[in-house]
Image (cartoon, grey):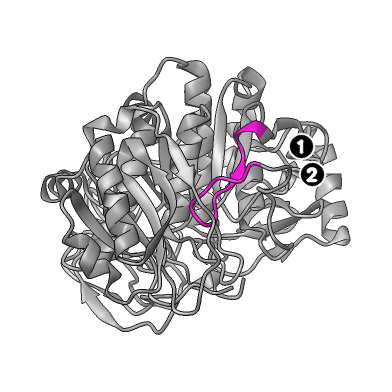
């Protein structure tokens, strides 16, 4: 997908999470009950938009709102009864305004700015596919070092967080599953097949889960993002290719990328969080932001409805025992600043440059309550040049790769090596690559502490992270002599690394 390199994310300080919760007033107490989901199919007509309608959660209100939806020329696509979210299609240009005036509707808005037609990830740059010559060189070095996986000599990221040593103690439990909410996962890859959980996988595009065989797979080999992420988490130690951070846990794929433009629309993500929760997933990885808005501003009714709907779904997942981990972003923004420039929204039509306050305009799902926000580091242990940061915003850090930080590996490639579709391997960098390292460590923690709640797992991630101080010298990520970012805070907690770099070895020893 050609737009992938431009994908960026933001994050939120803890005090702002509290203010977000208070200002919205929509965190549903009924989110602990399993949502009954009903759906219908509709062929999109020209001019049709998708909407989320968020209501009170009682059955009578939902049924009344459904009637109002029909009266306003809307068609219900899916209803998540217990969280009060209804996915709707309508070609009526006044639908949003009409439905917001209906009694029982708490928020409602369009989930896109362009009509439905008959990418939103956080990798920085296109994948570099591993050649046969490069693979042979790495395999020789891995064999000489006595490493179990042929390409492990190039996995500096595993060694950086002690994942190579952790695997010898506890590779993770088969009772723990990490769901990759992304562009799909190629479960036929020999490094992923041993740990793949088809029963916990689906295609959620359109807001309704499709669990038919292979529905979770990427559309094409170019939709490699989810497969790369899955390998970072749980590629098996089976003498083939690479190893994941938690090579003994299960990995699932929940596809949410639109087949036309590759974007991650809100109704797809709502479906994914609910599906993961209802199918016993312990951890989700979210290396994307919900399109079409990089920031969803609460003074806009459409954007507010997106925040509301996705938050209800991810809170439901948390209350069912799922920890949600998300990437912090590739814009090198100070996320604790008063103003940021968003020149990419809406990304499904014509972007308009706007200045936003990240304390009032939220990146979803990263800025939602209880979501673990992850920044990226390179092989030298410093912040990756592209990674967003901010004191009180980033929770923890993890290897995401950095082309300017060169490792002492056979390939001398500072990016992250992992699985790609069609039994191939390649390098990527981005906070998209940092987040799955944290998801993998969280899975190891869940394996070690099976009764830990999502909140307890997040606390353990922070407690066991290796505290990393701000750099002593001004930060120049790309070496051009210009200061690119300023780190604020102390050694224990700061803007670049949060509570520190996660540690897989500590996760299995304590």
Q: State the residue position of label 2.
A: 188
Task: Examine the rendering and report whether any part of residue 494 can be seen.
Answer: no
| Membership of 398 in magenta stretch | no
Q: Position of residue 188 (x, y in %)?
A: 79, 44
Report crowding for label 1: few under 14, some 14 to 19, many 20 or more residues within 10 A (C-alpha): some
Residue located 32% across and 77% down the image: 93
Between the C-alphas of marks 2 and 1, the distance is 6 Å
The answer to which of 46 and 471 lies nearer the viewer is: 46
Placement of 95 over or under 376, stated as above or below: below
Placement of 50 over or under 2, stated as above or below: above
Classify residue 202 as left or right of residue 86: right
Which stretch did the figure color magenta?
199-211
Circle 1 — which element? helix
Q: Main secondary structure of the magenta part?
A: loop
Residue located 15% across and 52% down the image: 103
Q: Position of residue 97 (x, y in %)?
A: 21, 69
Placement of 508 over or under 241, stated as above or below: above
Q: If the image is split into quadrants, where does the C terminus sit?
A: top left
**Looking at the image, is mark 2 or mark 1 earlier in the sequence?**
2
Asked if marks 2 and 1 touch (Cβ < 8 Å), the reply is yes
């Amino acid at each position: 997908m050609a737009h992938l390199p431009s994908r960026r994310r933001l994050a939120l300080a803890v005090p702002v999470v509290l203010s977000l919760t208070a200002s919205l007033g929509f965190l549903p107490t009924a989110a602990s009950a399993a949502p009954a989901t009903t759906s219908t199919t509709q062929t999109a007509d020209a001019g049709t938009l998708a909407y989320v309608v968020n209501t009170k959660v009682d059955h009578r209100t939902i049924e009344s709102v459904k009637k109002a939806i029909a009266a306003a020329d809307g068609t219900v696509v899916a209803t998540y009864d217990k969280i009060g979210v209804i996915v709707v299609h309508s070609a009526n240009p006044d639908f949003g305004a009409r439905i917001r005036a209906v009694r029982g509707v708490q928020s409602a808005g369009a989930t896109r700015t362009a009509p439905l037609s008959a990418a939103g990830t956080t990798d920085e740059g296109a994948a570099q596919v591993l050649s046969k010559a490069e693979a042979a060189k790495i395999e020789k070095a891995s064999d000489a070092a006595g490493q179990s996986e042929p390409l492990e000599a190039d996995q500096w990221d595993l060694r950086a967080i002690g994942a190579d040593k952790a695997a010898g103690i506890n590779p993770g439990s088969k009772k723990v599953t990490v769901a990759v909410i992304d562009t799909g996962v190629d479960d036929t890859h020999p490094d992923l097949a041993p740990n793949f959980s088809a029963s916990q996988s689906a295609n959620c595009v359109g807001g309704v889960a499709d669990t038919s065989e292979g529905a979770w797979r990427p559309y094409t080999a170019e939709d490699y993002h989810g497969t790369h992420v899955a390998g970072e988490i749980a590629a098996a130690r089976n003498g083939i290719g690479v190893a994941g951070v938690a090579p003994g846990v299960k990995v699932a794929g929940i596809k949410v990328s639109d087949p036309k433009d590759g974007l991650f629309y809100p109704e797809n993500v709502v479906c994914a969080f609910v599906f993961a929760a209802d199918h016993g997933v312990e951890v989700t990885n979210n290396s994307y932001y919900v399109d079409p808005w990089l920031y969803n501003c609460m003074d806009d009714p459409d954007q507010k409805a997106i925040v509301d709907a996705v938050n209800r779904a991810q809170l439901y997942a948390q209350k069912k025992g799922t920890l949600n981990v998300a990437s912090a972003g590739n814009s090198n923004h100070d996320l604790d600043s008063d103003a940021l420039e968003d020149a990419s929204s809406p990304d499904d039509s014509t972007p308009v440059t706007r200045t936003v306050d990240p304390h009032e305009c939220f990146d979803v799902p990263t800025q939602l309550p209880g979501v673990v926000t992850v920044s990226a580091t390179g092989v030298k242990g410093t912040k990756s040049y592209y990674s967003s940061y901010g004191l009180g915003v980033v929770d923890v850090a993890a290897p995401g790769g950095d082309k300017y930080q060169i490792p002492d590996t056979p390939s001398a490639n500072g990016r992250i090596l992992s699985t790609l579709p069609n039994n191939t391997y390649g390098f990527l960098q981005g906070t998209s690559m940092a987040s799955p390292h944290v998801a993998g460590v969280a899975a190891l923690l869940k394996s070690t502490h099976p009764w830990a709640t999502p909140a307890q797992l997040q606390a353990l991630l922070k407690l066991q992270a290796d505290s990393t101080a701000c750099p002593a010298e001004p930060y120049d990520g790309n070496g051009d002599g210009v200061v690119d970012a300023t780190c604020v805070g102390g050694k224990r907690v700061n803007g670049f690394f949060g509570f520190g770099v996660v540690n897989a070895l500590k996760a299995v020893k304590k």
